[in-house]
Image: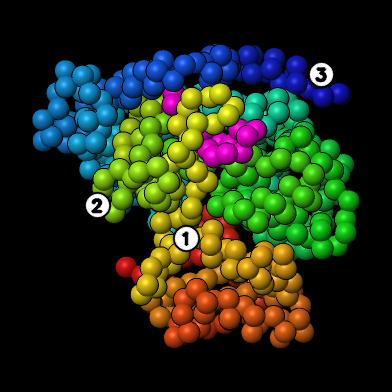
Amino acid sequence: MNTKMRVGLYRGWMRLTGRGPQIQLHQEWQKKQYLPADQSQQDHLDALARMLLHANTHVPLYQKQFAMAGFNTAAIKANPCAALESLPLLDKKMLREHFEDLSSDDLDGRQWHVNTSGGSTGEPARFIQDSSYHYYGMAGKSLFDDWSGYSGGAPRVILWGSERDLLVGRESWKARVGRFLRNEYPLNTFRMSEADLRGFVDVINTVRPAQITAYVESAFELARLVEREGLSIHSPDGIVTSAGTLFPHMREVIERVFRTRVFNRYGSREVGDVACNCAEQDGLHINPYTHHVEILREDGSPCEQGEVGEVVVTLLTNQAMPLLRYRIGDMASWSGELCECGRPWPVMKEVAGRVNSILRTINGTFATAALSTMMYFKDAEKTRPFESFGRYQLVQKSLDHLVVRLAIENLELFAEERPILIKNIKAVFGDDIRLDVETPATLPRNASGKHIYIWSELE
């Protein structure tokens, strides 16, 4: 069956299985994405007001918080942004402690389920998501897929690493039928040996996907193996990366090896897909119909353009358990420029890293992008990458103590490169930094199966 027929089969299956709302939203946003900025902003404020009014009417915790802040229905309608900013920030600890009070009192009239997330920090969270959230989320994915040139039903290879998301071989028959109709080929990267990666190359060359959707790290490690071993690999129309920080050198390697564009997609299990690169690749467009994003300083005040701060997300589509001002755990900054694609949607610069991946010294802080460059290239000109090790982990134990874990690929070469690496690290952290260089057989992953490159244990 050719791709055109598979796309048609997929669209027919979508309609027959009650996914009309998803299709309708996708088509609506295709038309609205180029609306004038003032109209797009008004649509966004209307969606924000609807969510806040629902929370004030049906969610006990928010009822108390709005009352304490002096916001009634009229005040919320008049200034939804001010009403939102009157609320305290929400985190996973509060989700655990106030699960019942964060649940809407009209759940009996909704289709909903409980979802969970371990996340990069490993802190478990339980939350409720309803059918509306699902339709909005899938429509958002479809819109972001449009930007990468992909149409649902065309062949897609998925390189994903979550054991709970990829129970391949243990799926129900309905799940297997769904994957067939979506024309998806999942490859589990929860544990990736070199033999596994070579097998992935064979699958990609056989399937010849229009799109590859991947963990950032999975796509990068696969690209490194293909380049290192001189393998031939199919070039898809686009690669969509998610679930990790896409560092500049990673994008460069993936695009060079696969001879295609990388589209970075940003979100989490709690709030879904928030933003994505367009073809201009000049930042991440936030979908104003699904999310409201703030970037805040440590004191809670909003960051200026270009200033890195903590990302706080308000989900506009899940009334079963509204997540208002949710601390997603990432650091980012606002772009100061309108994107040349013509979409007036808010644009974040590429995410700088996790909140706990910002390492500190007595003299300042270092974001993950700068640190990843230090660990990937031997030289300041960024022309000579390290070749003796692949994955790494930087763990800051204290201001003057850093643990460096390396996955060694060439022990003899590492003897030559080790002094260069230590020199690079001390150039950043100072000569007095205490370095423990470890070369374990395997590097630990987090509960979601992701490899974490950099994190801080400082309070």
Check disc 1 and report the residue beneath it.
367
| Count of numbered circles on the image | 3
Which amino acid does the dot numbered 1 rest on? Ala
Q: Which residue is mark 3?
A: 5
**Amino acid type at image mark 2:** Asp
Tell me where residue 418 appears, x and y as whole percent. 65, 82
Residue at x 38%, y 77% (from the top left corner): 398
Q: Is residue 441 above or below residue 174?
A: below
Q: Which residues are magenta?
A: 275-290
Residue at the spot x=13%, y=34% of the render? 69
Among numbered discs 1 and 2, the one appearing first in the sequence: 2
Neighbor class of circle 2 (other Cα within 10 Å; few <14, some 14-19, many 20+) is few
Residue 208 position by quadrant: top right
Q: Earlier in the sequence, mark 3 or mark 2?
A: 3
| Relative horizontal placement of residue 458, taking residue 254 as reference (left or right) | left
Q: Amino acid at mark 3?
A: Met
The percent position of residue 93, horizontal first and vertical second, equals: 30, 52
Residue 16 placed where, x, y %? 64, 14
